Image (spheres, rainbow, N blue to C red):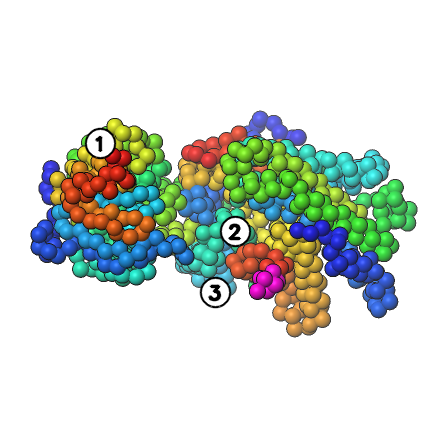
Amino acid sequence: MSTGMGLASAGSAPGSGKAMLDLAGINAGYGAFQALFGVSMRVEAGEAVAVIGANGAGKTTLLRVISGLIPATAGSMTMEGTDLRRTAPHRIVETGIAHVPESRRLFPRLSVEDNLRMGAFIKPARARYAERLEYVYELFPRLKERRAQLAGTMSGGEQQMCAIGRALMSGPKLILLDEPSMGLAPVIVAQVFDLVRRIRSEGYTVLIVEQNVAQVLKVVDRAYLIEVGRIEKSGTAAELAASDDIQKAYMGI
Amino acid sequence: MSAPRFNPGYVIGLALMIAFPFIVTTFFPSSQKYYLHLAIQILLWAFIYTGWSLMGRFGLTSLGHGAFTGIGAYITVLLWNQTGLTPLIGIPVAVVTAALLGLLVGYPCFRQRITGHYFALVTLALTEFVRLVIVGMRDLTGGSLGTQPQRYGDGISIYAVQFEPDRMLAYYVALVMWVIGLYIWWRVDRSMDRFALDAASQDEDAAQSVGIDVTREKLKITALSAGMCAFGGAMFGQYQMYIGPDTIAGLSVSLNMVFAVIAGGMYVMLGPTFGAFFTQMLAETLRVAIQSSAWLKSTLGSSALALDSAIYGLLLILFIIYMPKGILGTAIDWWEKRKSR
Amino acid sequence: MDCALDIFFLEAVLNGLLLAGLLALLALGLNLIFGVIDVVWICYAELVMVGMYAIFHFHKTAGMPLVLAIPLAILAIAFAGILLHTLIIRPVLDSAPINQLLVTGGVLFLLQAVATMAFGVEFKNIGLQLGSLPVGEMRFSWNRILTFLVALAAMLALWQFLRRTYIGTAIRAISQDRQIMPLMGVDSKQVYLITSAIGGGLAGLAASLMVLQFDIYPQIGLQFGPLTFMICVLGGLGNMVGGFIAAFIIAQFITIGGSCFATEWGYAIAFLFFMVMIFWRPQGLFGGKA
């Protein structure tokens, strides 16, 4: 069951002061368009951290830079000491980072199980495939029921479950969640945030990017506010939730 | 884009082309027939390629237009040879048949949103089908050996639409055709249909939602393109006084069309013409070079003919990778950039 | 029309089945490239042609025994597949797919021309006759039976490879969402290269069986190239079993049409059938979504 498969190595245990994921002065963009300006942030082992902000503020870009889909043009990024900027994009998952992309991005014409298999593509994960598959199925019994179903035919909430399961198959330490509630009905959104709580309790470190500020601040420890590509505010979830500006601008209060 | 008629460059160019046979006769009296023959070939193929580009420029890349040129040629010749029907009627019949075939095949394609390389494959099937039918009806068509329209009298006649012995006459016929072809291109370019098709080639759904009947627009341009190519094919047959399933129909004809227009420039009025000029001159130059070089002849032997194919292939690869707008298109771009500096 | 429902008709039908084996084998490699990873190699038949010439020259000119010549040729064409992808496809991979068709069209011209210049236009034959199997009054060539069995085996092997291995799954995944492959630790470049090598290898395999049955000449690709594409699309892109069935249907048109009428009509009807079917079901008889 909850075997704490997500616990980080001792070097970056909570409270040790050493961050698991550390970004300093990151610039990034798309061609001539710069989307991130000097972004600095850190995530410590065992934490759940949120990055909140409006549409187009740069939240998704931030996750893509971390997981290597987009190159950073300046600054430094490390994961447990490994320099991410010098790691080839397809090798970043080996450092222990798993990215659950925006809109799930499952392989629609592959079965649920094939999608999960793809998550275990890297060599260390392959060796433990059977074990991890059982783990994911125990965590998400619905996926086991639908293991042979084509991923594209499932509902939004089920797809989200499958996308998270796929990320778990690689045996990660840090999970990047990109707007998990986007495009889902409110009832399903609540289920998704329950999933996030579930993952936390399994011991995984979580970095979650969200537009749904009210809900996400309830499941994380700390949060950063990003506006037009810059970090404008940071603090504990309670602090940000109580802040007037955030309440007015992002929570409609 | 300014009207070509009012651009002095075009007027001078046209004047030169009208004067061309006389220039040739004056300076190269002995090879007059040869140079005129080259020019006629270029003009006829330029007409056909221009017809193909009407579809190609809107993302409807067809590998099957050999079917239309073939139908144009074969229906005209067969009606003349078998029933004595004058090509004055036979050619329009062939043109309409080709246009109808284009509509028949186009309609399900466009309704089903078959585009891009899937569309190309369907047209591939079409051209093969037509070629196979031509060869299969060998009693009528002469099979893979081809056939000839029966010569009427001395070979020059309006009734039989024959003009091959008089190269000057043939040249002017081809010139008029070519100008008409450019005119058609120009009219399409300025029409509302052009914008509709441009929009459709970028985003069909968006175009549809703005009220453009995408299927109808595509069918119109298909009928026009097919008809033009059929007309070109028919006239080519009348000039060559010979038609064959591989010279005026089939896959190689189709692929040559694609290559020539890509090399010349698909989005520019004179692009297909330049493509025709380029491919014909390339073939001629190679032929002459091989004839006059004993070394080349001995190394390559009979397969020397394949050399131009090899060069086409290489050029096509290079063009697609480095110059997708073709020679003329890229040159025009470069010229525009220089002007705006 | 000289077609009676007699023993020769049955022979034609069964020969059609065997021809289907050959067509299915040809379609298998193309289905992997075109159907699974969604890359257009219009020159696929020309790769087979080169494979045939390779076997001929390794065996006849260099004197290698066939058991050596054939695997060597398969490796050579597998390598050709890699070259084709690296030099020709990669530069245009991100632009419209029609460009892939056109650029490999250039390769088609080039390969045919080079083959003509290098080997001449005369037909060549490896001269190996395996004889035929008599069944009652009918005779079936061992060549064709062998081809059929090899096609079946290759199809099963490829199917298992795609379904059961990690790289096979990645190959199936890459055409569905190329961008997120790095997130799973997959190097897209590698996947394309491996698939291109396998596609080339299958072309080489088809060549080795064709060389036993047919004369070799530079334009031979034009005979079965378009047909192979039709079969892939008809069977539903990426569907190996669908491809086999489509091959069977097409083969029946060809053999029955060919024995009742002239050869061309069989092919003509096959192409007509293809067009009608695509209009009716654009995703192919057994395809998923269009």
The magenta span reads: B335-341
Outermost residue, front side: A244
Observer-side mark, 1 or 3, equals 1
Task: Give the x, y percent position of residue C187.
Answer: 33, 54
| Chain at numbered mark 1 | A
Are the two marked residues, 2 and 3, in contact with CB atoms closer than 8 angstroms? no
Q: CA distance from mark 2 to mark 1?
A: 45 Å
Residue B157 vs A186, above or below: the answer is: below
Identity of the residue drawn at 48% across and 40% down: C232
Mark number, residue C62: 3
Q: Which residue type does callout 3 highlight?
A: Ala
Residue C167 visible in the current orientation: no
Disc 1 to disc 3: CB gap under 8 Å: no
The overriding secondary structure of the stretch rendered in magenta is helix
Where residue B103 sits: x, y (%)? 64, 34
Mark 3, secondary structure of its residue: loop
Tell me the element at label 1. Answer: helix
Q: Quadrant of the C terminus of chain A?
A: top left
**Magenta span contains residue B10:** no
Camera-side mark, 2 or 1: 1
